[in-house]
Image (spheres, rainbow, N blue to C red):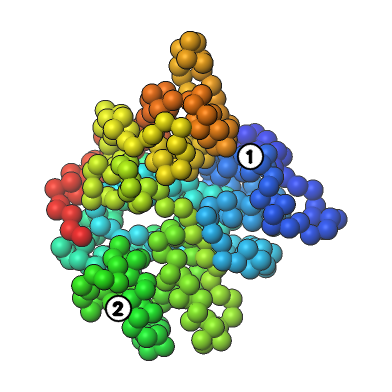
């Protein structure tokens, strides 16, 4: 995005000085579709320098709109508005376990969300949870393999276009950070553990991909206490994680109540994309039939989408439609169908509601939707493929990761 494009995008979404207007409610902000489209376009395309220019000219309401658009749920919206009014650069906490290959739900969606956050002036701290992966027995608990996987995932985000220029995004390795400030970290973990009963901690096991009925090690029981401590250790204002991490983020807010801490972390939980097959509520990186991987070749993507669950006229729990809603339309600001004139001709959908209506009444058939979805995903992933073909470090990392056995 050049300076002229940045200027045009800013002008398209800029509001006049809010000091001369009555306060704008969160519902008013979220219903402004035209501003939302311009904001999404800006956040995906802007470089670091363009982002800083745009952010300096945004109102609190505009910044709120960008950040709030990420979350399926926000606890609490009024706290988010107050935070943005008081703090020019809030700290957002995100994180991941280096535990295998990366699927598009983790790769593309995180790039979208991080770019939106930085475009709204946030500092994003991405916690590379290597110790947590070891606690959770990922990669057989081999910390060296886990580190290789972590480096590989960073290369994937570089390839797909996560805005890593400047200092707005910081990757932090949990083992190194905890060891460097152990005197701060472990007393906090111990206090969280001391104040919570075992059943409350067990209810958080979902954050590890486990359930309360699983046979857990002592290390896995300790995991939620550590993840809760991470939020305060990183001085996070906003927890930007998936809905599957909600319970431990709520635990952090409860801990604030218990200890009379002010400024509870705001929870911004994004939607969890389903697997490709029927009944798969969450895309699993360990199940090739469930996942489109970030470095999948074009033919792989085409075959997986072709076999994906996509019943005609059914919108609810349709994974193909979910990928269009949460990945394709936010990425391109549209979804394009190419078909013969006798089948209705080409059509461009500018929003998901219009597409869903056409699909539900039968005007759009899976046979036309699936090829268009494959084409869009391949277009997003093409820079990733190029990065791993042309960058020797990335190529070596991918080769090593593919040779590892993924353990649950």
Left or right: 261 with respect to 312?
right
Q: CA distance from mark 1 to mark 2?
A: 44 Å
Q: Position of residue 229 (x, y in %)?
A: 41, 77
Q: Nearer the viewer, residue 241 or 28?
A: 28
Compared to residue 264, the image places residue 22 above or below, namely: above
Q: Secondary structure at mark 2?
A: helix
Q: Which residue is mark 1?
A: 38
Q: Which residue is mark 2?
A: 222
Q: Nearer the viewer, residue 271 or 175?
A: 271
Residue 320 numbered mark, or none: none
Q: Nearer the viewer, mark 1 or mark 2?
A: 2
Query: What number of labels is visible?
Result: 2
Pick whichever of labels 1 and 2 is earlier in the sequence: 1
Q: Nearer the viewer, residue 276 or 40?
A: 276
Say which residue appears at 23% left-offset and 51% top-offset.
286
Q: Position of residue 354 (x, y in %)?
A: 58, 32
Q: Position of residue 265 (x, y in %)?
A: 53, 71
Compared to residue 402, the image places residue 379 above or below, namely: above
Say which residue appears at 64% left-offset and 47% top-offset.
54
């Amino acid at each position: 995005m050049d300076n002229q494009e940045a200027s045009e995008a800013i002008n398209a979404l800029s509001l006049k000085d809010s000091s001369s207007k009555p306060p704008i409610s969160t519902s008013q902000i979220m219903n402004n579709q035209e501003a939302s489209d311009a904001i999404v376009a800006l956040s995906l395309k802007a470089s670091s320098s363009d982002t800083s220019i745009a952010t300096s000219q945004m109102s609190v309401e505009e910044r709120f709109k960008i950040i709030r658009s990420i979350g399926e749920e926000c606890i609490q919206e009024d706290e988010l508005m107050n935070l943005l009014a008081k703090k020019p650069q809030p700290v957002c906490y995100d994180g991941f376990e280096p535990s295998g290959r990366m699927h598009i739900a983790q790769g593309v969606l995180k790039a979208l969300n991080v770019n939106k956050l930085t475009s709204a002036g946030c500092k994003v701290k991405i916690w590379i949870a290597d110790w947590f992966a070891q606690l959770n027995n990922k990669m057989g608990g081999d910390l060296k393999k886990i580190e290789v996987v972590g480096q590989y995932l960073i290369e994937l985000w570089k390839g797909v276009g996560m805005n890593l220029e400047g200092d707005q995004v910081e990757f932090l390795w949990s083992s190194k950070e905890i060891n460097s400030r152990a005197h701060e970290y472990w007393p906090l973990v111990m206090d969280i553990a001391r104040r919570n009963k075992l059943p409350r901690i067990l209810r958080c096991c979902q954050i590890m991909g486990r359930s309360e009925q699983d046979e857990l090690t002592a290390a896995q029981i300790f995991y939620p206490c550590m993840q809760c401590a991470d939020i305060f250790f990183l001085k996070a204002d906003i927890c930007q994680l998936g809905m599957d991490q909600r319970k431990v983020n709520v635990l952090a807010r409860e801990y604030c109540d218990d200890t009379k801490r002010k400024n509870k972390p705001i929870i911004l939980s994004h939607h969890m994309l389903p697997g490709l097959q029927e009944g798969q509520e969450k895309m699993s990186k360990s199940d090739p039939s469930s996942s489109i991987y970030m470095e999948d070749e074009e033919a792989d993507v085409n075959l997986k989408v072709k076999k994906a669950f996509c019943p005609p006229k059914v919108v609810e729990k349709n994974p193909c439609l979910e990928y269009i809603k949460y990945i394709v339309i936010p990425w391109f600001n549209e979804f394009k169908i190419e078909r013969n004139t006798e089948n209705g001709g080409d059509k461009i959908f500018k929003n998901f509601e219009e597409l869903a209506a056409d699909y539900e009444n039968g005007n759009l058939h899976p046979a036309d939707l699936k090829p268009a979805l494959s084409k869009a995903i391949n277009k997003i992933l093409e820079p990733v493929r190029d990065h791993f073909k042309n960058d020797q470090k990335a190529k070596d990392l991918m080769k090593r990761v593919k040779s590892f056995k993924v353990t649950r």
